Image (tube, rainbow, N blue to C red):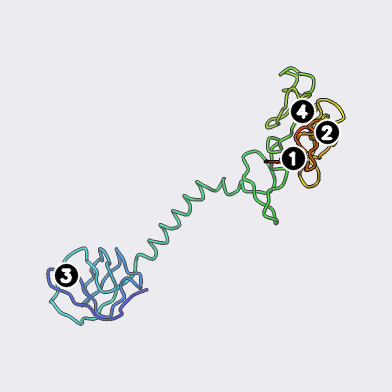
């Protein structure tokens, strides 16, 4: 393929060529292409824009502008060969890796997600599925190691946890119970000491201390009528 859009200006003794209406860069002219002017061939050293290029040797003809020209492309085949070489290198370097991508688990394979965008369970190691194991009887480390897998969570002395669970109670019927909350997130009144359930008591008839003490409990608030003369 050749390029001859527009005209050029050439100067005797100069390797610079200026174009007018030319498309050197747009039409992919480049190094090693041949510029033909007045029947003479010049090898292009570089193309800097659509209207400027440089030759590998100075122009030997007469200085002139508005000259017709033709550029014979040689870079297309060269570029294609270079691209083929680069692709071959990539295939040699990464071909094994690309072939390792699969949805079937195996050694040195690269997992590929399924149609749902997730990896199949078979790709996941046991370590990814954490299990919590309770060791009740102070088992030895050797026993625990043989009964667990990588990534498991082991709670040794778990009897203490079970004891706490057993103490949970909605009613404090015996010492050592752990109170449970009701549906509103509060401790039941039956689980609180009397002092925590304060009541306001009004005494306005001059009741004696003994009478008031007998009618109240620890924590109550008492308001008595006091006469001031």
Q: Are marks 2 and 3 in contact (CB under 8 Å)?
A: no
Nearest to viewer (mark 3 / mark 4): 4
Q: Check the image and report above or below for 120 versus 14.
A: above
Separation (CA) of disc 2 from disc 4: 49 Å
Instruction: Give x and y (percent) for residue 108.
Output: 62, 39
**Local SS, label 1:** strand
Q: Position of residue 98 (x, y in %)?
A: 58, 49
Q: Which residue is mark 3?
A: 59
Where does the N terminus fall, quadrant-wise?
bottom left
Residue 86 as seen in the image, left or right of residue 164 = left
- Which dot, 3 or 1, sits closer to the camera? 1
Gap in Å between the C-alphas at discs 1 and 2?
Answer: 12 Å
- Say which residue appears at 22% left-offset and 66% top-offset: 55
Label 4 residue SS: helix
Q: Quote the CA–CA distance across marks 2 and 3.
A: 129 Å
Residue 179 located left or right of residue 97:
right
Dot 4 and dot 1 residues touching (CB under 8 Å): no
Give the residue drawn at x 76%, y 29%.
Answer: 133
The residue nearer to you, when weighing 171 against 121, is: 171
Disc ID at residue 224: 1
- Disc with the residue nearer the chain's start (2 vs 4): 4
Among the two numbered marks 3 and 4 on one chain, the one whose residue lies closer to the N terminus:
3
The residue singled out by tag 4 in the image is 161
Vertical placement of residue 59 versus 220, above or below: below
**Mark 2–mark 4 contact, CB under 8 Å?**
no
Most foreground residue, 101 or 136: 136
In this rendering, which labeled residue sits more in front, label 2 or label 3? 2
Q: Quadrant of residue 179?
A: top right
**Separation of marks 3 and 1 at Cα, in angstroms:** 123 Å
Which residue in the structure is indicated by mark 2? Answer: 211
Kind of element beneath mark 3? loop
């Amino acid at each position: 393929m050749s390029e001859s859009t527009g005209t050029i200006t050439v100067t005797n003794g100069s390797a610079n060529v200026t174009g007018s209406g030319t498309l050197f860069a747009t039409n992919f002219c480049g190094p090693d292409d041949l510029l033909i002017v007045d029947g003479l061939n010049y090898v292009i050293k570089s193309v800097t824009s659509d209207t400027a290029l440089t030759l590998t040797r100075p122009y030997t003809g007469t200085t002139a502008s508005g000259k017709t020209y033709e550029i014979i492309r040689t870079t297309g085949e060269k570029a294609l060969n270079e691209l083929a070489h680069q692709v071959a290198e990539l295939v040699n370097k990464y071909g094994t890796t690309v072939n390792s991508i699969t949805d079937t688990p195996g050694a040195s394979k690269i997992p590929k997600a399924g149609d749902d965008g997730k990896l199949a369970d078979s790709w996941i190691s046991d370590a990814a599925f954490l299990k919590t194991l309770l060791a009740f009887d102070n088992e030895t480390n050797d026993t625990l190691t043989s009964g667990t897998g990588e990534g498991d969570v082991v709670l040794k002395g778990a009897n203490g946890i079970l004891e706490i669970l057993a103490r949970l109670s909605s009613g404090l019927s015996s010492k050592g119970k752990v109170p449970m909350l009701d549906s509103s997130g509060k401790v039941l009144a039956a689980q609180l000491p009397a002092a925590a359930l304060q009541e306001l008591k009004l005494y306005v008839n001059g009741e004696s201390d003994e009478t008031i003490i007998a009618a109240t409990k620890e924590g109550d608030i008492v308001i008595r009528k006091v006469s001031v003369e």
